[in-house]
Image (cartoon, rainbow, N blue to C red):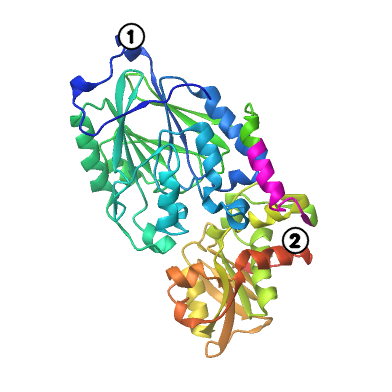
Amino acid sequence: MGRERPIPVPPDADLDMSPPHDPSDENRPLRVLHFADLETVYDSPEHVGRLAGRIDALRDESTLVVGAGDDTALGSLALVTAEGRAQARPFFEAVRPDAETFGNHDLDPGIDRALELTDGTPQEWLCANVRGLDSVAPSARFEVGGRRVGVVGVAHPQTAEMCGVNVTFTDPVSATNREAAALRERGAKYVVCLAHLGDDPNFAAAVDVDAVLCGHETTRRTRRVEGTLLVQTGGNGTEIAEVVFDGGEPTVTFHATAEAPIDRSVAATYRRRRNAAGLDDVVATVADPVERTADVRFGGECRLGNFVADAYHEETGADVGLVHSASLREGLPLADEGTVADVLGVVPFETPLVELELTGGDLRAALEWSGEPFGDEGGVNLHLSGARVRLDGGRIAELRIGGGAFDAGKTYRAALMNYLPRTEYFPTLSAENVVAERGPQYEAVVAHARDGGLRVNCDGRIRRG
């Protein structure tokens, strides 16, 4: 990885302070390589090695390499090794990205741990809509192939609520426009925004930038909104988006990483870490692969959701087990010899498994809150164990607990990861109702897999009509 990186331009540099360059460079297109939501890529040595190799093969002196958040986050290595989220550092040091913004999961371990990582990695960490992180710049300018390029970073405005940190995230639109205007005044020919907001066309329409490069969701997307290009890649390092600026409208090409040349040094580093942590130990043989796609986890009752909900239910003895569909991570199917790493990667969160005592009415209200995702197109926001629901137009028409009739006046115990009552996304799942706390939720999931829990089927827990 011997190519020179683009040169960050000091914030107070005037136009006549630009480094000298050959004017013919300006005829070369500017290329931006974009990734986001790498999440569990570090658990697969070959996969992370090929991601690094793909970036190196695509990069040249007219290229900027950027990330749009959740690129340090999640995965089994982050849970069971001393490095934690610093698992990303060897990849960053090899690839040397130019700029990055924060995803919500990057801040899960807390502000201090996040800032330790930002201080020790080579890229410029940017976030324009945060208060309280004085060491993080809102934007930066780079000299790329003789041109100045401005980069703004913004995080999701609900980041503090999502990860429980004591900082304030402000309106990303006004923050982006403020920084974009300042960058253009200081000579930026192009301005791109790294936005950990998901596929948000309203944001793209409201900001004065040339391109919005998204994180937070993992469905490939390309849009042009009010003259602004919006790009979102598939997650977990499955692909890189290449955005080319060549005088007209920017163009996008997606590059898969599955068959990329492999950076053997990066792969070897992660292989050593994985072996040392015992992540290759086999916990179950899976004859019928358990799929982990986005369509599966949000598309209705699924074996993956049933497996995790069963783990919470059976390992605690609670009346019901509940798992948020968004907590199930996408990846390769669980198949053949399932390892500790494979199972940890399904719900790679350190949060405790807790039991809540809820009235029947509050339990039903929590499920009803899922009415919109449960709606007519078949999506679900929760997966269940110990309970069965029948849905009619997104509303719960029938609910049974433990094979018996539901009683709104009865008190029930629900087992779930502490994230839900801590963030209060589900209004009636409150931290005040927690009556027992177990160990890290992933320990229950691994134990359940060892006990045969991956021999799981769909059995009519969520029905329609």
| Lower sequence index among marks 1 and 2 | 1
Q: Taking 167 as reference, is 361 above or below it?
A: below
Q: Is residue 27 left or right of residue 436?
A: left
Is the C-beta separation of discs 1 and 2 under 8 Å?
no
Give the tally of numbered discs: 2
Report helix, strand or loop for mark 1: helix
In the rendered image, residue 288, in percent from the top left (x then y), is placed at 78, 53
In the rendered image, residue 1, in percent from the top left (x then y), is placed at 53, 25
Question: Between 439 and 396, which is closer to the camera in this rendering?
Answer: 439
Q: Is residue 74 left or right of residue 7?
A: right
Please name the amino acid that badge 1 sits on. Ser
Which quarter of the figure has residue 69? top left
Q: For the C terminus, which image quadrant?
A: bottom right
In the rendered image, residue 389, in percent from the top left (x then y), is placed at 60, 73
Report helix, strand or loop for mark 2: loop
In the rendered image, residue 129, in percent from the top left (x then y), is placed at 29, 50
State the residue lying farthest toward the bottom. Answer: 409
Separation (CA) of disc 1 from disc 2: 60 Å
- The answer to whether residue 99 is visible is yes
Q: Which mark is residue 454?
A: 2
Question: Between 255 and 299, which is closer to the camera in this rendering?
Answer: 255
Q: Residue at image x 23%, y 47%?
A: 174
Question: Between 461 and 262, which is closer to the camera in this rendering?
Answer: 262
Label 1, on which residue?
24
Q: Which mark is residue 231?
A: none
The residue carrying pointer 1 sits among few (fewer than 14), some (14 to 19) or many (20 or more) residues within 10 Å by Cα, namely few
Task: Judge depth for marks 1 and 2 and give the one in front.
Answer: 1
Per the rendered image, the range of residues in magenta is 268-283
- The answer to whether residue 464 is visible is no
Please name the amino acid that badge 2 sits on. Leu
